[in-house]
Image (spheres, rainbow, N blue to C red):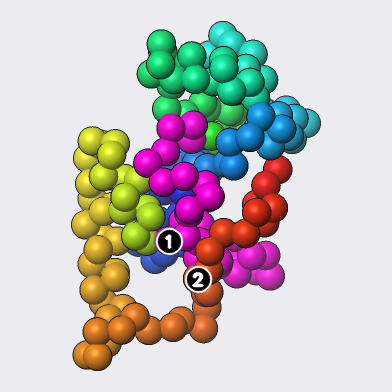
Amino acid sequence: MVGGVAVNLHRYIRMTTDLDIVLEMSDENIRNAISILKACGFTVKIPVDPMGLADSRTRAEWMRRKNLKAINFWRRSGRDQIDVIVASPVRFETLQLTRFRVRGTVYPAASKPDLIRMKRETGRDVDARDVEQLKRLIRLEQPASGKARNSPRRSVGRRRRGVVKA
């Protein structure tokens, strides 16, 4: 999980209207993720077959010719929206995760440093504010010794293949 929801989980609360996710970009994994989104009632607004993302050549062409950065899935029955980030400055394989437990469910989200790297690239005002607030939170977590405190509410670890794969 990346984007505004991840920022909120890191304790900088702000409005967001969608859930942004980064996937392991193998064709099979993308095909599985799109199948799951479709089964849950999600569709895309743009006039393309989203399964095109599951073909590395088509995906590369969309990124090159159409400057595709993400594809938005939405559910007609409500306001639910999920953006699948296609062009991310932080690759899925290197993403550092912070895991948050909310009402008994564990949610993996990009670490503050990875969110900062991702948000610097967008050029959007909201992301610039997120970067400043995430940096502030990092500074606040530094005790006098300069080492980050361990919080009992979350744990940080490297992404393991399969943990959040579709």
- Image point (29%, 70%), residue name: 138
- Image point (31%, 50%), residue name: 117
Residue 50 shows up from this direction:
no
Examine the structure image and report whether residue 92 is included in the region drawn in magenta: yes
In the picture, measured across the screen, residue 71 lies left or right of residue 64, that is: right
In the picture, measured across the screen, residue 65 lies left or right of residue 105, that is: left
> Which residue in the structure is indicated by mark 1?
111
Give the answer, above or below, for where 151 lies relative to 58. below
Q: Residue 20 at what x, y percent from top left?
A: 49, 41
Q: CA distance from mark 2 to mark 1?
A: 8 Å
The image quadrant where one finds the C terminus is top right
**Observer-nearest residue: 67 or 135?**
67
Give the answer, above or below, for where 139 lies relative to 121. below
Can you name the residue that lies furthest to the right here? 39
**Observer-nearest residue: 44 or 33?**
33
Check contact, mark 2 vs mark 1: CB within 8 A.
yes
- Image point (46%, 81%), residue name: 151
- Image point (48%, 15%), residue name: 62
Amino acid carrying mark 2 in the image: Val
Amino acid carrying mark 1 in the image: Ser
Give the answer, above or below, for where 106 lies relative to 25. below
**Observer-nearest residue: 113 or 137?**
113
- The numbered mark, 2 or 1, whose residue comes first in the sequence reads 1
Residue 161 shows up from this direction:
yes
In the picture, measured across the screen, residue 60 lies left or right of residue 124, that is: right
User: From which residue to which does the magenta span run?
Assistant: 85-111
> Which residue in the structure is indicated by mark 2?
156
Please tell me the numbered disc located at residue 158.
Answer: none
